[in-house]
Image (cartoon, grey):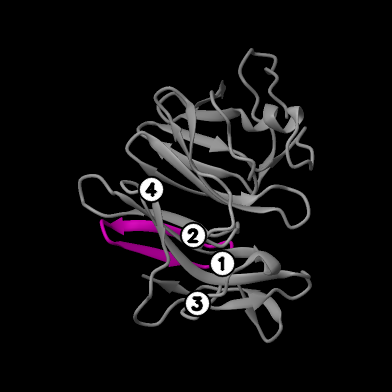
Amino acid sequence: MDRNLDVSGQYKLGWRAQHTTAVVGEVLYCWGGDQEGLDKSHDSPTKRECTSAIDVFNLLSGVWSSKPTRGTPPLGIKGVSCAVINNNIYYFGGWCGHGSCYLNSLNCLDTLILQWKELQPTSDNSVTKRGYGGMIPMGSEGEPQQLLVIGGLAPKLATTLYRQFEYIEIPGVDGHVRTNEQNIYNLSSGQWIVPFVSGQCFPPTSLFIVERISHNKGIMYGGLVTDGGRDISTNNSCT
């Protein structure tokens, strides 16, 4: 990863893809993604060097900087979903970067001290291991107490099929499915819930945008879906 300074002594941000960004106050945090120096291992000192740093953009000064974090960062580094509640950034799932290694861990970064905390480890629980989906906070207007995870890509063999959701094989990608699965994590109890949904559910979708628009509602737009045996980009939107 390019963390060198330019000729003026200012931090030079390297190229990045499949990363996450989140805004807390007047600061934008950029973490993870494919980047220079990242290897394809499950875990290694080189990978930890990449995941243990977070790039920070000050919205007032317009200056980038790189900050070290403390604790153990997630292993899922590409296609991770993130959401913000107060000073905390929550990160769910993602692709490890090799084979079909997807995760369903939930981690929290406290931006006040840049400290990682694992809330839920990756395990064979009720939540599908996946990446390239979305996540938003839910709950009370004052301080949301739940996280809603929706959609994404998942390895077929590691997926529990729920009748209220769909899992469609991805054309040209062996052993993977695209889903509209939804999961709710209760921050108070530390428990996952697989809800039943009412109304018309969105089709299995990945690589979309989802934003919270009220304490109990979000809006989802675009992404990739499967249609007629091929992947297509969509302009679907739903709330």
Of callouts 4 and 3, the N-terminal one: 3
Of callouts 1 and 4, the N-terminal one: 4
Of callouts 2 and 4, the N-terminal one: 4
Magenta residues (range): 206-222
Q: Under tag 3, what secondary structure?
A: loop
State the separation of the CA atoms marked 1 and 2. 7 Å
State the separation of the CA atoms marked 3 and 1. 18 Å
* Nearest-to-viewer mark from 2 and 4: 4
Is 106 placed above or below 232 here? Answer: above
- Sort mark 1 into few (<14), some (14-19) or many (20+) by Cα contacts within 10 Å: many
* Nearest-to-viewer mark from 3 and 1: 3
- Sort mark 2 into few (<14), some (14-19) or many (20+) by Cα contacts within 10 Å: some
Q: Is residue 3 left or right of residue 146?
A: right
Could you tell me if the residues under marks 3 and 1 are in contact, i.e. CB atoms within 8 Å?
A: no
Please state which of residues 202 and 237 is positioned toward the viewer in this rendering. Answer: 202
Could you tell me if the residues under marks 2 and 3 are in contact, i.e. CB atoms within 8 Å?
A: no
Q: Residue furthest front?
A: 124
Is 98 placed above or below 56 here? Answer: below
Could you tell me if the residues under marks 4 and 3 are in contact, i.e. CB atoms within 8 Å?
A: no
Of callouts 2 and 3, the N-terminal one: 3
Residue that mark 1 sits on: 223
Amino acid type, callout 4: Gly
Amino acid type, callout 1: Gly
Q: Position of residue 238 (x, y in %)?
A: 40, 72
Magenta stretch prevailing secondary structure:
strand
Residue that mark 2 sits on: 209
Residue that mark 3 sits on: 165
Of callouts 1 and 2, the N-terminal one: 2
Residue that mark 4 sits on: 190
